[in-house]
Amino acid sequence: MTTGPRVAVYGAYGHTGRFVVAELRERGFVPLLSGRDADKLKELAYDTGLVAHPASVDDPASLDRMLADAAAVINCAGPFATTAAPVIEAALRAGVPYVDVAAEIEAVADSFTRFADRARESGALVVPAMAFYGGLGDLLITTAMGDWTAADEAHIAYGLSNWHPTAGTRTAGAVSRQRRGGRSVRYHNGRLEYHQDDLPTLEWPFPAPLGPRPVIGEFTMADVVTVPSHLPIPDVRTYMAVEAARDIAAPDTPAPTAADEHGRSGQTFVVDAVVRSGARERRAVAKGRDIYAVTAPLAVEALDRILTARTRTTGVASAGDLFDAPDFLRALSPHITLELRH
């Protein structure tokens, strides 16, 4: 019988939440299932034999009950514009670490600005965007920096073979677009800027075996919040493979389907992270499979390091600030293959 730390998973029955629950169990933790849909929770509890605690972000007492026996919480329930603040508040009341897998730029930025002082003063840890978008890119850029203390530019190019979005991804994207009034966002000259310029298409020199591919420039992801939160880089830009950008934009692109015994889809990815300082350039490259599935080891590795005191700071922190980035990425093998090119 597993007797490891109990970890509440909010949104446990969602696509990513199920990967997180499985990863927690694989690593000896005891997931406490939670979320807003009592019927889905009951079904998942029956399938897994785990305890379920229905909770609503509109009912703080239910969130407190969810965390009563928990050592930490991982929030997998989007849209995070709705769920992040109430679950963080509950974690602060309970005195437990909070990790989420948000990819919504504004929601991640809100977590930093709203809770930075309170979390730091109480010695708490709040880690937003500990996922494929936001977390992985930050770890790669931090690793690529090496002994540099500053850089002029950071670039993160996402070479996805395809992008079949979950229902949660579509809902979160709709919320973000509404918050922006349909505008695009970028991080330039040390700040977030909103604009209505057309996004450029260019060719990105992905390493072999992918090779050069057309990408959408300024296809901005949560890395523009996580990277500048701790690194003095005035321009942070992200790019998306044209094929994946078309998939996510099309209303009829199907949801991901399992292609192996672990529930992973056949989607593959190459993430090419580059930092530039003057004429010098360094890069770190990650390769793997299924952006939703790989979020689980990212979030659970973070949680394990938090609970075993392998952290560098307190308060609201991104992955690259909180952890030894190269060591963290090496620990993700075999989920991610890492290459450094200095």
Image (cartoon, grey):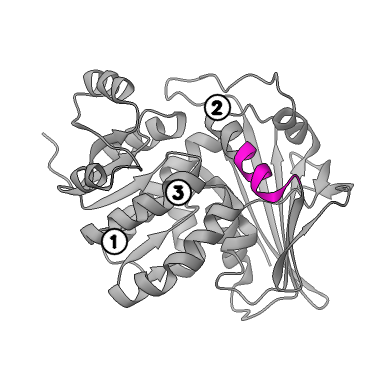
Mark 3, other Cα within 10 Å: few <14 / some 14–19 / many ≥20: some
Q: Quadrant of residue 40?
A: top left
Q: Residue at x 38, y 30 (%)?
A: 18
Q: Earlier in the sequence, mark 1 or mark 3?
A: 1
Instruction: Identify the secondary structure beneath mark 2.
Output: helix
Q: Is residue 168 above or below residue 69?
A: above
Q: Position of residue 189 (x, y in %)?
A: 76, 73
Let me know if residue 180 is in the magenta part: yes
Q: Position of residue 267 (x, y in %)?
A: 62, 29
| Res 167 label | 2
Q: Earlier in the sequence, mark 2 or mark 3?
A: 2
Q: Residue at x 68, y 73 (%)?
A: 233
Which three-letter amino acid code belongs to the residue tagged 1?
Leu
Seen as rendered, the residue at the extreme front is 58
Pick the quarter of the image with the C terminus. bottom right
Seen as rendered, the residue at the extreme bottom is 149
Mark 2, other Cα within 10 Å: few <14 / some 14–19 / many ≥20: some
Relative side of 125 to 112, left or right: left
Which three-letter amino acid code belongs to the residue tagged 3?
Leu
Let me know if residue 170 is in the magenta part: no
